[in-house]
Image (tube, rainbow, N blue to C red):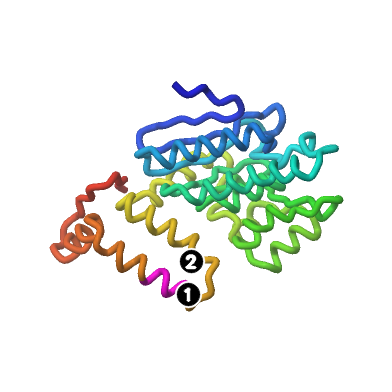
Amino acid sequence: MPQPFQFILSERQRDTITIWLNHPERLNVLSLALMEELTQAFVDAGESDATGVMLAAKGRLFSAGHDFAEMANQDLDSVRHLFGVCTAMMQTIQSIPQPVVARVHGLATGGGCQLVATTDLAVAAEEATFCTPGGKGGLFCTTPMVAVGRTIGRKRALEMAMSGDAIDARTAEAWGLVNLVVPMNELDDASTRLLRRATRGSALSKGIGKSAFYEQIAMNQSDAYVYATEVMAAASLIPDAQESIAAFIEKRPPKFTSPSTTN
C-alpha cells in the first residue's frame, strides 16, 4: 500500500480527483519533497479511471512558489536537479489525459503562478493575485515564463517578469491566465462547474485531444496542421468517435464505451 503524502492531499469523489497543496504553514512553497509528491499524485490520477482533476490549496494562499531555503548556498547540480523536478511536475500535469482545473485563491507567485499557467483551465477568487517577482530581485523567473509566456503572450509575460509586479484576478482573466473570476464564496462551485463542463463526452477522445493540443501548439502552423490532421484522422476511427458520428446521424444521445460525464 502506498504511503500517505506529507505535503499534499489527494481525494477522490465520484469521477473527480482533487489534489490539494497541503503545506499551509509554509505557504505551500514548492519544496523538492512537495513537488515530488505532486508529480506522483498526478501520475496516479492519470493512470486512474477518473475523468477530471482539480488542483487546489489549503491555507490562506495558493502557493508562494519555490522554496528559497533549498536554493541557498547550493551547487549547480543541486539547483539543476530542483528545477528539473519542477519541470517534470509541470510536464506531468499536461501529459495526463484528464482535464486539470486550478482552483486559485490568495496569492500564486513564482512557481505557483507557473502552476496556474500550466493547468488546462483555471478559476480564481476575486481577491487572488498573481506574480512572477524575480524582476524585482536577483533571480529572474525564467522557468515560470515558459508556462506564463505561452499562456498570456510575450508582451504581457515580459511585463510581469521584468516588473515583478502582481496582477489582480480580473487582469489575469483579461490576459488569459485564468478562465473565470468569481467571489470567494463561489469558488468551489464555479471550479466544479467548469471541470464538469470540461469532462463531458468521451474521456478517451478528450485525452487524445489534450495530448495533441500541447504537441501542436509549439509547432509552426504548417507542421501543426500536418500533425493535427493525422491525429484527428486516426482518432475518427476509435469506437467513441464512430459512436458520436452515428448518434448525430441518428439524432440520439451517444453511448460511449470509455468513462464520461454528463451535464
Tell me if residue 224 is in the magenta stretch: yes
Rendered image quadrant of residue 210 = bottom left
Residue drawn at point x = 79 percent, y = 39 percent: 71
Q: Which mark is residue 223?
A: 1
- Image location of residue 173, percent across then percent down: 60, 57
What amino acid type is highlighted by mark number 2?
Gln
Provide the secondary structure element on which disc 2 rests.
helix
Query: In the picture provided, is 93 more to the left or to the right than 227?
Result: right
Q: Secondary structure at mark 1?
A: helix
Q: Position of residue 70 (x, y in %)?
A: 76, 35
Q: Magenta residues? A: 223-229
User: Which residue is label 2 attached to?
Assistant: 216
Tags 2 and 1 touching, CB below 8 Å: yes
Q: Can residue 187 be found in the magenta stretch? A: no
Residue 60 or residue 12, whichever sits in front: 12
Q: Position of residue 238 (x, y in %)?
A: 25, 58
Q: Amino acid at mark 1?
A: Asp
Residue visible at 49% across and 60% down?
A: 214
Q: Is residue 12 left or right of residue 110?
A: left
